[in-house]
Amino acid sequence: MKVIFTICILVLIIMGSCKKEFIELTPQSTVVVDILYKTDKDFQDAVIGCYTPLQAQYQNFWAFGDLRGDDSRQEVLANLSNVSFDNFTLNNDDNRLTSTWINYYQVVSRTNLILSKIESIDVSIVKTKDRHIAEAKFLRALAYFDLVRIFGDVPMLTAPITVNEAYNLSREKVDKIYDEVIIKDLMVAETNLPDSYTGTDVGRATKGAAKALLGKVYLTRKDFAKAEAKLKEVTTMGYALLGNYKDLFDYSKNEHHKEYIFDIEYEEGIGEGSNITNAFTPQWTPIADVYGIKGLLGDNNAPPQSLYNLFDPSDPRRDITVLLGGVTDKNGNFVKLPPQSQQSFTQKYMTSVPSGGDSKANWKVIRYADVLLMYAEVLNENGKVNEALDYLNQIRSRVKISTYSNLTKDELREKIYLERRLELSSEGQRWFDLVRTGRAYSVMQSYGMKPYMTVFPIPLTQIQIINNRTIFPQNEGYE
């Protein structure tokens, strides 16, 4: 799957690189496009092209999911964009907001085009038609799930549109997008995607990925009954925790293991690597030498001492999640970070990088530990405290630390929230957990958050292109 990411469908961006950009649109002349969509392989390659914008997007997802929260800090002030994400001074003209908008709407546009072309295709010609539809809908649902969590109300597109139609788009309510696109798409995906793949197809979305994401969607909407039912299904599909937590982040081993559910895939040496490893490495060459990391170093995503202090000293997750002060080299010498560098970093993405921005470390969108913690949460919310305890304790038993017993519902809720921090830090979860549980403002107020900042600003370029505040307003507080 990593290798075949390079195949893309032919698409048209409404504005060129020197102009304002909005979303991708189908070419008004579709002769070439129609030629492309004929065979089973045509559609398979086209769906692969829908993953490509996600590769670009998830290299920056940590800024939304981690840096915005309290378990990641931008200690070095050289990157002003990261500073603004961190301390809630983000302007609506930030380039990362614009690229995020474009990346996700590229996925939406490409999947819409595939779905429009495949509808009339005979199943005798495209034998895996249902699978292609399911995979496209999974990717569209993932894109919209991230869009509404980041921006709130956004345009809801379910078919190709013309340039003129694009200029009259309005923002639809989040609930409508959940009901009419995200949930319906994932229900199709969970029905028609395969349980697993072999060969070069490994890494594509599966039935388990669709069910796990749908469970997260229900949890986010506080539909605990449906979330419980869906996440329970995932626990019966053969997934399991790895015996050694450290193996999750050992990139000399296969990343498609029994705890893997869905990653954004990267591969070194073929132009498909990520910049995540470089971005998270302190700007101190001796540190990079320990891991064999080449290229520019980012000095980004410094997990704070306060997160480190939450771990049991015997918890093997602690030093993987928050490494303080420096690192021990292969000769047993402690390599200390200089004072001008950030003073902590995560080892979750540390692997050798042969050239800058070419890391093979995948971004974990959903893994089984996340599912177990979500399942524990919904069981507890549904009053099944003892069952919930069992699933929470599976996470703690894996790392051989003390388990919990005799907790009230309220006590257990807080323990589950804590365990998500300990288990999933620097995996894009913390900020969205704070928002969906209604705790964002109380936790982040001291960092500069205002009550309206549960969503990010709509990119200024998009507001200017539509230029009609009646149908396309900026989010409250960001004008």
Image (spheres, grey):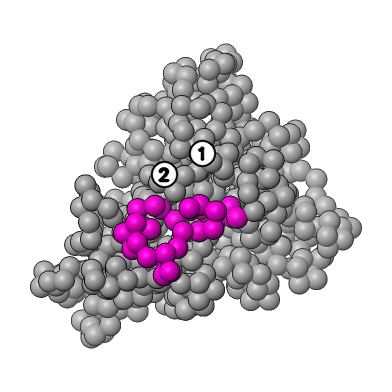
Asked if residue 396 lies left or right of residue 462, the reply is right
Dot 2 corresponds to which residue? 94
Q: Is residue 221 magenta?
A: no
Classify mark 1: helix, strand or loop: helix
Q: Does the magenta stretch include residue 468?
A: yes
Residue depicted at 77% across the width and 66% down the height = 380
Quadrant containing the N terminus in the rendered view: bottom left
Few, some or many residues within 10 Å of mark 1 (<14, 14–19, 20+) = some
Query: Up-down: is 191 above or below 326?
Result: below
Q: Where is residue 403 in the image (x, y as percent from the top left)?
A: 80, 50
Tell me the magenta residue range. Answer: 452-479
Asked if residue 319 lies left or right of residue 329, the reply is right
- Residue 126, image quadrant: bottom left
| Number of numbered markers | 2
Q: Where is residue 190 in the image (x, y as percent from the top left)?
A: 48, 74
Asked whether disc 1 touches disc 2, contact meaning CB atoms under 8 Å apart, the reply is yes
Question: Which mark, residue 84?
Answer: 1
Residue depicted at 54% across the width and 33% down the height = 74
Residue depicted at 46% across the width and 33% down the height = 80
Q: Where is residue 367 in the image (x, y as percent from the top left)?
A: 55, 55
Between disc 1 and disc 2, whose residue precedes? 1
Question: Which mark, residue 220?
Answer: none
The amino acid on which the numbered mark 2 sits, given as a three-letter code, is Asp
Q: Which of 254 and 470 is in front in this view?
A: 470
Q: Nearer the viewer, residue 251 or 42?
A: 42
Q: Position of residue 91 (x, y in %)?
A: 47, 44
